[in-house]
Image: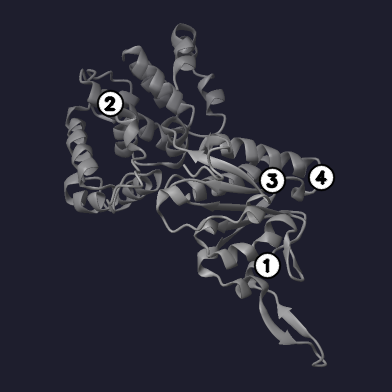
């Protein structure tokens, strides 16, 4: 880590960042306090770890908590010149003074029903002259005569110099205007998001079996394709939309996460041939359980995916819980914890199912021991 401005800042998972910042901004809005009360936030982390995803989730959290619309203005500072941020100079009506045409990024809705979130992405990749132009935006919430509306949040994100991505050392004057947080890779945090958003069950199952493969980033490594939360999301998109047959999709997958990881992923997915029909499980037919640990990880991920598509049919969910009660306790706990991630407050619906209440009484203590 860069000892100038990384080693002495807090490290948080995406889930923790979303929860804490989402709550902080929602509290300010509910108390009708100025959003500028919170300092502008800077998220640091390696490529693909989920910095941009965290900002989008914070916006959703604010929207859910306050009922306001959240409009994100995503500005890639790497593509800007300093003059772009201030606007284009032109003359006033009587040709006596120069005025600056407001850049499109400052065209924001200042109504009370809206929250604007100005996201300065890749700020550490911007040359020092552009970073200097961001001084006013991050602290004074203005640049030149252009002022951000009161309903605007300012956040920034970038890679660390030690990541060996495109990155310039941030000037101390800019760094001191920001509240810094390093984004920490966490499988449990990622999985909560993955279940709720429909990441493909084969991706979730494999990473449940091999959680260390969620993020395999080494700055000194010259590999072009490597596993990150972002690249796994792209793998999931291919499996969800093109085909979930791994063999014909193998080259695409290898182009995203690298050949080594893709070989392991393809080999592991062969356990799906051992799985009982999901329809039988959810219809209450109680087919035999797989014995192989790999297959149990695949089965629980597949059941969560099926449950996500049938989460309002509590009879089917109850059947699956009865089936899960036959699993080794660790796997039934894994499954039912993931069921709670299907949507906000889904646990309340689960508590209305007698089979879940019974499982909770007998084995619910195991939930507290899971990371």
* Residue at horizontal 41 percent and vertical 41 percent from the top: 198
Image location (x, y in percent) of residue 293: 24, 21
The residue singled out by tag 1 in the image is 106
Q: CA distance from mark 4 to mark 2?
A: 53 Å
The disc, 2 or 3, on the residue closer to the chain's N-terminal end is 3
Query: Which residue is under mark 2?
Result: 280
Q: Indicate the position of residue 318 as horizontal and vertical percent values.
A: 42, 21
Mark 1 or 2, nearer chain start = 1
Comparing labels 2 and 3, the label whose residue is closer to the camera: 3
Which residue is more in the foreground, 101 or 276?
A: 101
Count residues near mark 4 (Cα–Cα under 10 Å), then give few for <14, some for 14-19, many for 20+.
Answer: few
Q: Earlier in the sequence, mark 4 or mark 2?
A: 4
In the image, taking residue 213 as reference, residue 83 lies left or right, namely right
The answer to whether residue 283 is above or below residue 354 is: below
- Viewer-side label of 4, 2: 4
The mark tally for this picture is 4
Residue behind mark 3: 67
Q: Is residue 151 left or right of residue 334?
A: right
Kindly check if marks 1 and 3 are in contact, taking CB atoms under 8 A apart as contact. no
Q: Residue at x 75, y 49 (%)?
A: 35
Residue to which mark 4 is pinned: 32
- Disc number lying in front (1 or 2): 1
71 w.r.t. 214: above or below: below
Mark earlier in primary sequence (3, 4): 4
| Lateral position of residue 116 relative to residue 29, left or right | left
Q: Is residue 325 visible?
A: no
Q: Residue furthest bottom?
A: 95
Find residue 222 and name its label. none
Q: Indicate the secondary structure of the residue bearing disc 4.
A: loop
Q: Answer yes or no: do the residues labelled 2 and 3 have beta carbons within 8 Å?
A: no
Residue 224 screen position, x and y as percent: 29, 54
Nearer-the-camera pick, 225 or 270: 225
């Amino acid at each position: 880590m860069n000892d100038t401005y990384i080693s002495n800042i807090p490290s948080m998972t995406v889930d923790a960042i979303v929860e804490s910042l989402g709550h902080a901004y929602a509290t300010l809005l509910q108390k009708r306090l100025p959003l500028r009360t919170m300092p502008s936030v800077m998220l640091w982390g390696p490529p693909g770890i989920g910095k941009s995803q965290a900002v989008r989730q914070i916006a959703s959290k604010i929207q859910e908590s306050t009922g306001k619309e959240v409009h994100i203005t995503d500005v890639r500072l790497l593509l800007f010149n300093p003059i772009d941020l201030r606007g284009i100079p032109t003359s006033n009506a009587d040709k006596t003074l120069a005025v600056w045409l407001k850049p499109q990024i400052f065209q924001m809705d200042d109504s009370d029903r809206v929250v604007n979130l100005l996201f300065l992405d890749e700020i550490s990749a911007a040359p020092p002259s552009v970073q200097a132009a961001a001084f006013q935006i991050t602290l004074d919430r203005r640049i030149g005569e252009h002022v951000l509306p009161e309903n605007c949040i300012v956040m920034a994100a970038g890679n660390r110099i030690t990541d060996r991505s495109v990155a310039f050392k941030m000037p101390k004057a800019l760094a001191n205007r920001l509240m810094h947080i390093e984004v920490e890779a966490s499988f449990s945090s990622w999985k909560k998001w993955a279940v709720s958003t429909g990441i493909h069950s084969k991706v979730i199952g494999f990473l449940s079996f091999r959680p260390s493969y969620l993020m395999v980033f080494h700055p000194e490594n010259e590999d072009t394709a490597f596993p990150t939360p972002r690249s796994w999301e792209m793998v999931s998109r291919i499996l969800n939309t093109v085909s979930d047959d791994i063999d014909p999709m193998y080259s695409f997958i290898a182009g995203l996460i690298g050949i080594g990881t893709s070989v392991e992923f393809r080999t592991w997915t062969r356990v799906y041939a051992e799985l009982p029909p999901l329809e039988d499980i959810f219809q209450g037919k109680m087919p035999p359980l797989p014995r192989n640990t790999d297959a149990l990880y695949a089965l629980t991920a597949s059941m969560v995916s099926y449950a996500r598509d049938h989460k309002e049919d509590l009879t089917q969910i109850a059947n699956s819980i009865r089936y899960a009660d036959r699993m080794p306790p660790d796997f039934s706990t894994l499954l039912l914890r993931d069921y709670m991630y299907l949507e906000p407050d889904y646990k309340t619906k689960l508590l209305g199912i007698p089979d879940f209440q019974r499982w909770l009484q007998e084995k619910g203590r195991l939930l507290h021991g899971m990371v």
